[in-house]
Image (cartoon, rainbow, N blue to C red):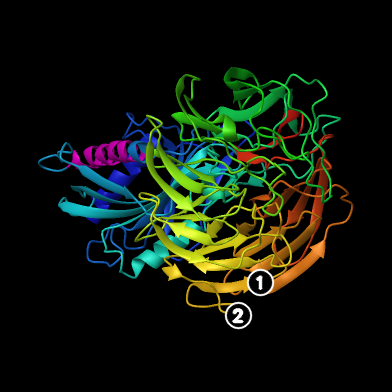
Amino acid sequence: MKPALIQRCLAALVCMALVPATIGQDDAIKITFEERPGWRGETIKLPPGFARDMTVKGIEEIRFAPGMFKADQEDFFSYALVFYFPNEKPLDQKRIQSELLKYYRGLAAAVGKRRDPPIETKGFKLDIKPVRKEPGKYEATLHWIEPFTTGKPQALHFELKAGRASLGGSYLATAASPQVKKHKIWPTLRKMLASVKIHSGGKTAKLATAASTQTEHWPSFRGSYASGVADGQDLPLRWDAKTGLNVRYRVPIPGLAHSSPVIWGDKLFLTTAVSQDKKASFQPGLYGSGKASEDRSVHTWNVVCIDKRTGKTLWTRTAAQGKPIDKRHIKATYANATPATDGKHVVAMFGSQGLFAYTIDGDLLWKHDLGRLDVGAYNAPQYEWGSASSPIIYRNMVIIQCDTQKQSFIRAIDLKTGKTVWNTQRDELPSWGTPTIVRGPDRDELVTNGSNYIRGYDPMTGREHWRLGGSSKITAPTPVYGDNFIVVASGRSPERPIFAIRRGAKGDITLDSGETANKFVAWSKTRRGPYMPTPLIYQGRVYTLGNSGIVACYDLQTGQEAFIERLDGTSNGFSASPVAADGRLYLPSEDGEVVVLQAGGELKTLARNNIGEPIMATPAISDNTLFIRGSQHLFAISR
């Protein structure tokens, strides 16, 4: 096709598709890229005139390489484009494939009808696959007929990112070229995508993929893989429970529970234990008593489903009823374990009362008897503190860690039937941490915190891969993973260690006396570990929060300490774990206050927001909202 004809085709397409990029009368949307010499672009309304069968609505911004329509150039048919959908959730793989096929078939048909013979589009094929370990990112190849210049078959390669914009809606960012991925055009295309900004109403959106956040789902304790991170949320810096500032709703939750909310889509799930004793309570605060609660009355253990948008209770199911089999610590409840969901099932664990699985619509699927879980002080067996380790879902299994005074074990249970898939005995003292799945290119690892050993298992079989000694005699924090490091900590004196462990370890990797690192332990600290809150890995740093309000920050790669300081103004301390979003850390205290810190190498307090009741449960983040479970209410905090 001659250059003049190419220009006429482009002009025709623009006439069909180019419109003012506005979503509302006073809410103009603008997408910008870093300016580069010779790169030009267009703004197109979606669905475009050449592909009316697309189901998405929004705008497209595209930047063509200088040699876009010159077949003899290295950057021929290379470009970066962004689709922005103001009213769509992030597109999944199936929908991306469908929408892009419609787009390119329509494009080829509109341009190719000027050829003799016209281009036939039925044979076009788009192969797409997710990028391993990076949810929301995909690689794809389109097998089609290039219609503008050559009219010949072309394999057009893509790198794709699907995610959510903090101003609302979602986006699909695309780099495309027929060149192989090792070609020098690809770093340029990636830089173009990295420079993308979406502007609306005088604000610039933060763009997040599922790799950095679960913007919609928060499926288990502290979100996916216990990361506690959800960027691209645009959470408010300040809120006020008394005046209602930035509080979307506040709904009462009967009973006592330290379990956290979990979320899938628009459904939020909680557990609670309701006592017949109207004066039933727990005692927050900084103290060392191992005393058990005297509340042994009949309890009802409930699983509750709430519409996360409105706070309305959708259903409540009673999992068990009767007198508690065990005692509980005076600071604990009979519903400490956070439930888990995969969008089809909801699994709730109530210690010795058992493990229960429901559909997300509230139908009971099965109950799994765990036996009596005697969890308490290792050196004073007469104390009973109650269990707190939460279930996780991996593939088609529920995995639970039950470390007790005797007969400790870790077990995988079939999610559909409730039958045991594998069971591995553990020579362990009682513990309260939740197991974590660590994804890897060669193998996944199931990592558990424990007093005798921190361990890594094969999650499919329960076979032990590695073990690391040197923990505290009481372990509660959950292992976390980020940037190829597994961070595990515990806070009972005298050890109080923090370990940064490299993925893929084998055998006994315990440090020798005087060592702080070895082949698989990148670095370690003593007398620095937190007692209750789980560490947080965020933006290349590790943050720890002690019960007494001591915050520390370390470089994830080296372990170099950036700061260790005590927060002012907290009396009862911290039990819940910190979470992070958009460069801020949210630290919930037993005083009922959420302390907001600026992420970085120095301690900088941005705000302190009190909800008016103790917070023992770790918050959840989903769809631009911070969900805080207080001792009596569930709060939804959003702009």
Residue 481: image tag: none
Q: Quadrant of residue 76?
A: bottom left
Examine the rendered structure and indicate whether residue 77 appears above or below residue 506: above
* Residue shown at the point (62%, 26%) measured from the top left: 309
In this orientation, which residue lies closer to the viewer: 18 or 404? 404
Residue 599 at x, y = what percent? Answer: 70, 59
Question: Residue under circle 1?
Answer: 525
Please report contact status of discs 2 and 1: CB closer than 8 Å, yes or no: no
Residue 307 at x, y = what percent? Answer: 60, 23
Q: Amino acid at mark 1?
A: Lys
Note whether residue 638 is visible: no
Name the main secondary structure of what is drawn in magenta: helix
Q: Secondary structure at mark 2?
A: loop
From which residue to which does the magenta span run?
Answer: 96-114
Q: Quadrant of the C terminus?
A: top right
Q: Secondary structure at mark 1?
A: strand
Q: Assess whether residue 378 is covered by the magenta stretch.
A: no
Q: Amino acid at mark 2?
A: Ser
| Badge 1 density bin: few <14, some 14–19, many ≥20, Cα 10 Å | some
Q: Is residue 600 left or right of residue 175?
A: right
The Cα atoms of the two marked residues, 2 and 1, are separated by 13 Å
Q: Residue furthest left?
A: 117
Q: Is residue 47 left or right of residue 70?
A: right
Examine the rendered structure and indicate whether residue 524 appears above or below residue 333: below
Examine the rendered structure and indicate whether residue 112 appears above or below residue 477: above
In this orientation, which residue lies closer to the viewer: 465 or 486? 465
Please count the marks in the image.
Answer: 2
Residue 4 at x, y = what percent? Answer: 26, 52
| Badge 2 density bin: few <14, some 14–19, many ≥20, Cα 10 Å | few
Examine the rendered structure and indicate whether residue 304 appears above or below residue 544: above
Question: Residue under circle 2?
Answer: 513
In this orientation, which residue lies closer to the viewer: 515 or 324? 324
